[in-house]
Amino acid sequence: MSNMNRRRFLKTGGAVLAASSLPLSLVEVAFGKAQPENFSFAYISDSHITQIKGKEFVRNWDRGLIRAVAEANLLDPRPDFIFYGGDIAQLGKPEEIDHGLEILAGLRGDVHYVMGEHDYYLDLGEHWRKRLGAEHYSFDHKGVHVVVLNSILTYHDWTYDKWDTPMRRMKEMARLDNPQGSPFMVGDEQREWLRKDLAKVSKNTPLVILSHSPLQKIYKGWNFWTEDAEQVQALLKPFDKVTVLYGHVHQIEYNQIGNISFNSAMATAWPWPYPASFTQEASYMPKLTVAMNRADPFFERDATGWQFINMHTGDVDVHYLLPDNRNRVVAFDQKQGHPVDTNYQPESARIPPQHHF
Amino acid sequence: MTSLSTYRRVALCIFIAGLGSPVVNGAPLGLPPVPIPADNPQTPAKIELGDRLYHETRFSADGKVSCSTCHEKDKAFTDHRRVSEGHDGLLGTRNAPTVINAAYMKTLFWDGREPDLEGQSKQPPVNPVEGGLPNHEALLEVIRNDPSYVEAFKEVFGVNDASEITIDQYADAIASFERTIIAGDSPFDRYQYGGDKSAMSEAAIRGLKVFTGQGRCVSCHIIEETQALFTDNRFHNIGVGFKNIQGREAVIAGEFVKAKNAGADVDKTVLADPDASELGRFAVSENINQVGAFKTASLRNIALTAPYMHDGSQKTLEDMVTFYNNGGRVKEDDPFSPFLSGGIRPLNLSDQQQADLVEFLKALTSPEIAEQVTSTEIITEKRSD
């Protein structure tokens, strides 16, 4: 990304930029001594690399990841690091994870990884961990505390006792609207780790949490859902400013629950629609305010993409790079206290989605 | 349906009646009415002036290059060269697109860096590798010192004297002339829109099926219910020329943007620097998902406009079809561009299907253009005039 482009993006951030250009003394009042610095990072997710046989992989998903890597390598100035948001593979096969990592090895910069259910449910993350290390971890970067969770775990019985083969388990978890499915969760053990990890962090340090599934409840049938989301949110609640970044949903979503901003990642593989309804119980679904402009099935990359993220004094703005579509920017609006689409939020500015018959 | 085809026939009659004199309104079979900007209405005198300016060689450093040099009537308004040759034999980086039906384009140049023909016409005379004039003032000097031009500008634009002649008036006149270079009524048009099922050969009819089906051509080279512009006016990376900058994209893009921010002109940079040229639409939009994306060219009269692609790298229609059949690669074992458009993929067309596709492309030739064109040979030697 060029300097000029970056500046233009910042401009569209409006309120965000105004806040970060306040006199330093005022910012210090808000954030104390550990004044976070501004920085950016790239965020690629959900490539679903699929092996056909041997060295043959589904071309479409390969091309999506290859293109995102090539484009991310053009960011200028360079992002501080790159996040991969989970689901490198489709059926968790070592061949798929290895092929995906071979493509991702082309990235210029350090990459941090998040575990997705498609990476996990064949061998319960064994190959992934062998290649990439821990599945939950945290680090500090320029005054921001970054936490990575494995949010796609589920009940012990379902994981260990229910299925005759690992591949059967993988395929059951991959199925949408599966009556035999099971909801994602962070789980007691990892929540305890999170509690201890956060105990060391001052409450005015901005937090950025990365998980594969949304740490909010959107739609259970597709696991746009984390069963213990409220308990995780409760651990995040004491902090002044928290942003949760998640993959899995293959579309642009944003929401605000109390002090927590939620932003999703696009997939490099394919788009999912927004779930239309949820009638089981009271809906926690963030209202869909801005639909994707269009998705033309001819252009395989349309309605896919990747994103880079600017952090301004702990606030996040997400820049969506959408091939064959119009790029979008979802930025935290200080005045309104939640993320907004900087271009298409006003009703009059929206482009109705195109219907194909 | 009946009333529609009647309407078309009426429109056609108006056009035929207009042949020999400039088309002011109406449109030939297969094309919509020519869009005329409200602030630059067509008049016969303006079109005539534009015609003269289009052929004026004094708008160049060596006095030999006009618009017509690279967009010549008897070469289907192209130059039949890989890339264009400007003043004193200087070479640019891009293949001259035809002016025929350019009036319908929503952006001009391969990277769409100008929004209309008016904007386009101002660039080449002052581009260092094309006209080579130092500035527009030098061009206006030529006009202001030629009494016959001054008279014409007085008549067309109502200027009181030579000092009131502007570059925008020059651009308006040339654009008006170019809006008369319109051609439809090809065998395809007569087959598709004229109700003449014998207008295309059997092979071309089979080729049309490949074009709209397995060949996936029609998604960008659009054919509509009542007209066909054969372009979507969008920008796509189809894999042409990427090997020239492969692995160096970040450096080239970074340096380009740095230079642009420091005031470098896009038009001058992309035509002088072969690396910057390959950035395509990115040079204009600075959008990193448009690296190497170029505008979809119309296919009308394509059999008369070789060579092809933004860099003139494809010599024949057969080569071009092979390139697409290989999913954006010259040879089957070449690498794919990492920036390749999601619309481009190997097509698995049979030899027969590829040959039929070529026959279809040949059926996009307008009869009056075929009559004007004296040769379709690709020219490799330096210009002698």
Image (cartoon, coloured by chain):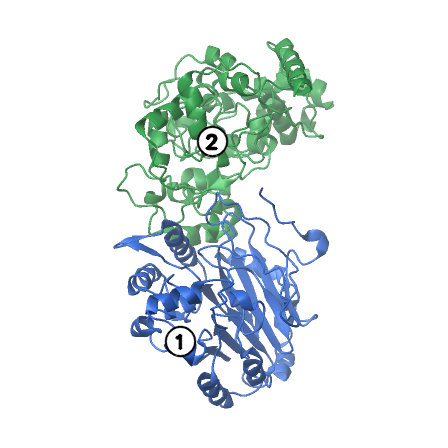
Chain colours: A blue, B green
User: Which residue is drawn at the image coordinates 40% and 21% (left, top)?
Assistant: B359
Residue B356 on image: x %, y %: 38, 23
Quadrant containing the C terminus of chain B in the rendered view = top left
Classify B21 as above or below B260. Answer: above
Left or right relative to A149: residue B1? right
Tell me which residue sits at (47%, 31%) in the image.
Answer: B212
The foreground one among A133 and A9 is: A133
Q: Identity of the amino acid at label 1?
A: Thr
Q: Chain of mark 2?
A: B
SS of the residue at dot 2? Answer: helix
In this orientation, which residue lies closer to the viewer: A243 or A49? A49
For the residues carrying marks 2 and 1, which lies nearer the camera in this image?
Answer: 1
Identity, as a three-letter code, of the amino acid under mark 2: Thr
The image quadrant that residue B3 belongs to is: top right
C-alpha span from label 2 to label 1 = 49 Å
Q: Chain of mark 1?
A: A
Q: Which mark is residue A242?
A: none
Decide which of A107, A236 is in the foreground and name it: A236
The residue shown at (44%, 41%) is B270
Q: Quadrant of residue B129?
A: top left
Q: Secondary structure at mark 1?
A: helix
Q: Are marks 2 and 1 in contact (CB under 8 Å)?
A: no
Relative image position of residue B354 (x, y in whole percent): 35, 28
Q: Which residue is mark 2?
A: B212
Can residue A252 be seen from the camera position used here?
Answer: yes
**Image quadrant where one finds the N terminus of chain B:** top right
- Judge whether A356 appears above or below B230 on screen: below
Local crowd at mark 1 within 10 Å, few (<14), some, or many (≥20)?
Answer: some
Q: Which residue is mark 1?
A: A159
Residue B45 placed where, x, y %?
Answer: 67, 16
